[in-house]
Image: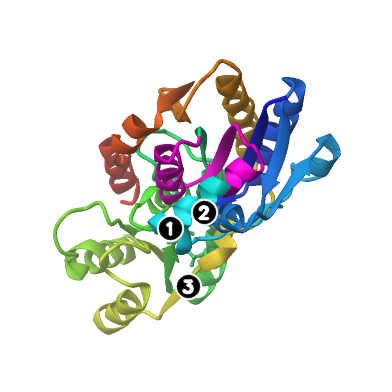
Amino acid sequence: VRKIGVLTSGGDAPGMNAAIRSVVRAGLYYGFRVYGIRKGYEGLINGDVEELNARSVGDILHKGGTILQTARSPRFTTEEGQKKAVSMANVFDLDAVVVIGGDGSHRGARDLSRHGVNVIGIPGTIDNDIGSTDYTIGFDTALNTVQDALDKIRDTAYSHERCSILEVMGRHAGYIALNVGISGGAEAVILPEIAGSLDIDKDVIKPIIEARNRGKKHYIVIVAEGAEGKAIEIERAVTEKTGLEARATILGHIQRGGSPTVHDRVTASVMGVKAVEVLMNGGKNRVIAIKNGKLVDIDIDEALEMKKSLDEEMIKICKILSL
Ligand code: F6P
């Protein structure tokens, strides 16, 4: 019987459990034995591996985080660490390892593949910043978490006639900031992707004053964590230049937790089955992706060369609607 390992790596994302469950159950359905590797590549190096059955993944579909736990493993970035991980994959006789994680985890999977371990990547990160796929598991849940927080912040911003500045995650990308900028009706959205230096007067102060002159009673500014301006600096500038009270909120890790949305559960489930079917069909070193609405698998080296960028049309829509 062929054996598959499954691990989650990098930052956790809601829906990772749904993906683990899907890999395990599809694996069993197709006659594989499936092994859970704890704490990502670190666990693989340490041989922290246990066989899973259909019941091991019961009652996890709706849970945030990852039952396998996760890590960002500095040891695995070294040649020595990678060789240890490979020898452990051989100890457990794994024919393939399914890696659920973000861009760095996919790069780790490629490193494993270069040492002869067959890998299949499943994109899981709240940042939605993997070039090979239009969508990453966890993004929708994170958006809804941020939106919920923003709605609450808006209530208090209105009551005090304040400006609220919300710093959201996304690492170097502005997918969360842009989408919530649209769904939350922000006056200004500061994105890492907008080239050139941030002009606080033009990009933040002017839209706020214009909104005030139109009779607005509260103001929302969204700042992506990877953008040039920091929420605290913007808070200070708004207070000094507009006379409004301003409050910065850094949402932090609340954005990574919580029960996955239907969209994330379904996407994770579909991608998990696809990963196993790719292995069934003899696929080697592939990543699962959604491209133009279709579920596809792509060679891992090609996938890691692929780039994507924020939709210009969405940036324009965000600006038009903030008027
Ligand atoms: O990649 C997910 C993410 O939450 C990013 O948005 C953020 O930059 C980073 O992870 C934070 O990492 P950590 O949890 O290790 O502080």
Q: Residue 63 lies in magenta, yes or no?
A: no
The disc labelled 3 sits on which kind of residue?
Thr
Specify start and end residues of the magenta stretch as a single range: 88-117
SS at mark 2 in the image: helix
Residue picked out by circle 3: 249
The correct choice, above or below, for 83 with respect to 130 in the image is below
Residue picked out by circle 2: 84
Q: Position of residue 104 (x, y in %)?
A: 41, 51
| First of labels 1, 3 by sequence position | 1
Q: Position of residue 239 (x, y in %)?
A: 32, 82
Foreground residue, 131 or 55? 55
Mark drawn on residue 80: 1
Q: Position of residue 4 (x, y in %)?
A: 65, 34
Determine the residue located farthest toward the left in the rendered image.
Answer: 196
The disc labelled 1 sits on which kind of residue?
Glu
Q: Quadrant of residue 152?
A: bottom right
Give the number of callouts: 3
- Mark 1 is surrounded, within 10 Å at the Cα level, by few (under 14), some (14 to 19) or many (20 or more) other residues, namely few
- Mark 2 is surrounded, within 10 Å at the Cα level, by few (under 14), some (14 to 19) or many (20 or more) other residues, namely some
| Distance Cα–Cα, label 1 vs label 3 | 42 Å
In this rendering, position of residue 297 left or right of residue 279: left
Q: How is the image coloured?
A: rainbow
Q: Is mark 3 within 8 Å of ligand 1?
A: no
Camera-nearest label, 3 or 2: 2
The correct choice, above or below, for 166 with respect to 178 in the image is below
